[in-house]
Amino acid sequence: MLTSQQLIQIRRQLHRIPELALEEYQTQRYLLQVIQNFKQQYLQIQTFPQLPTALLVRVQGSNPQKTIGYRADMDGLPIEEKTDLPFASQHAGQMHACGHDFHMTVALGILSYFSERQPQDNLIFFFQPAEESKNGGKLAYEQNVFTGKWRPDEFFALHVTPDLPAGTIGCRLGTLFAGTTEVNIDLYGQDGHAAYPQQANDMIVAAAALIEQIQTIISRSIDPIAGGVVTIGKLEAGTIRNAIAGHAHLEGTIRGLSQSMIERIDQRLREVTAGIAKSFNAEVKIQLNQGGYWPVENNPHLTAEFINYMKENSQVNYQNTQPAMTGEDFGYLLAQIPGTMFWLGVDDSSQLHSATFNPQESALRAGVTAIVGFLQAHMQQ
Ligand SMILES: CC(=O)N[C@@H](CCC[C@H](N)C(=O)O)C(=O)O
């Protein structure tokens, strides 16, 4: 079984080599290298030409009643790391700023344990590409990655959170994470000289008006108790100070804790964008894409069992958590296969997706121990 020091070394190596969605080749090679050092007797490894960076590892159970899936996402983010850590990202402009290096390391820790102590039930570890964008979970499901003996009956996964003490497990019955819609908007007007605005149609001004209007969707169009989010995270327009921009491109994300909330916000965003396009005499192209980012709905039965185990185990620090507006394409997988998503605390003052995110590595061992314990107890149910 991997020692605490080995877990830290693995996490640091993964942290050095973040790769973007569907480009996780080096990450996959490294995972395979680590797994080759485990006892192979009960293991089977599968890769897929249709989703080449994905990786499935199956552990044959001794007396299987079911097949339990455990998923860890693999991709990093297009963020330039600013931590100054000795093991900081070696890939310019890319960073494991969402803790997927932790997710993979904890999965390897659990896998190493069960490679040496054959589990009663079968286990399937799904190392999933493309969680941050391009919905790798949905792609895997639709491309029949989980067929025959590779289909789990249940699925579990964690996400790290800087908001809980290191090693704390957090979870809740019901909805854990929001569903999200990816937003792409292009506004087209007339470019021209900065000195002659009357002869042009300025898309920077139109984009500014649109962004202001978008802020009214949450404050004026939806039930404040229900909650929702629209964030425009990227705006591109113009080339130089003395030219009027004829094109603006906006990217953002919508979040809601229910499908109906997401649809309501989607609809208002379309209406507001059409209104701005009309008032600025602009052409507009709007693309709203939910993909696999469905609300993460925990299965009542499995999640109650998970929470009870964590609460009753004196070695585990457990906290009930509120629903979060983060998204996850594990929501899509949980809509197909029952299961539970939960948090692992990593105690940091920087948030997820921050260039200074620096999770506490003591959470690795605590996470492995808590999850191995739960899986063992769950197999005896
Ligand atoms: C945990 C986390 O941060 N997940 C991502 C999921 C991406 C959602 C989707 N691509 C979008 O941008 O809407 C998140 O941003 O919450």
Image: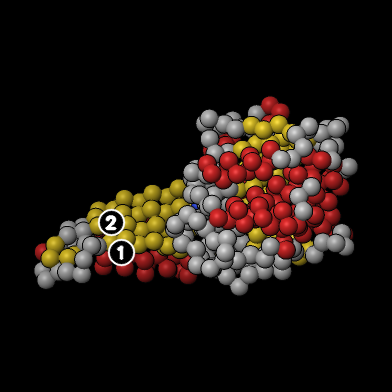
Q: Label 2: which residue?
A: 187
Residue occupying the point 78% across, 39% down = 115
In the rendered view, how is the structure colored? secondary structure
Q: Residue at x 87, y 59 (%)?
A: 313
Look at the picture and state if 283 lies above or below 279.
above
Is mark 2 in CB contact (under 8 Å) with mark 1?
A: yes
Q: In this view, does 298 lie to the left or right of 265?
A: right
Sequence-first disc among 2 and 1: 2
Left-right relation of 165 to 279: right
Give the CA distance from mark 2 to mark 1.
7 Å
- Furthest residue toward bottom: 349
Q: Which amino acid does label 1 sit on?
A: Ala
The residue at 54%/61% (across/down) is 88
Task: Give residue 207's mark.
Answer: 1
Q: What element carries label 1?
A: helix
Toward the viewer: 50 or 332?
50
In which image quadrant can residue 117 be found? top right
In x, y percent, where is residue 13? 60, 53
Q: In which quarter of the image is the C terminus?
A: top right
Residue 345 visible (yes or no): no
Residue type at mark 2? Leu
Q: Is residue 85 visible?
A: yes
Q: How many labels does the image show?
A: 2
Mark 2 neighbour density, 10 Å: few (under 14) some (14–19) many (20 or more): many
| Apparent side of residue 293 relative to residue 297 in the rendered image (left or right) | left
Nearer to the camera, 221 or 150 = 150
Could you say where residue 370 lies in the image, as x and y percent from the top left? 80, 55
Q: Quarter of the image holding residue 5?
A: bottom right
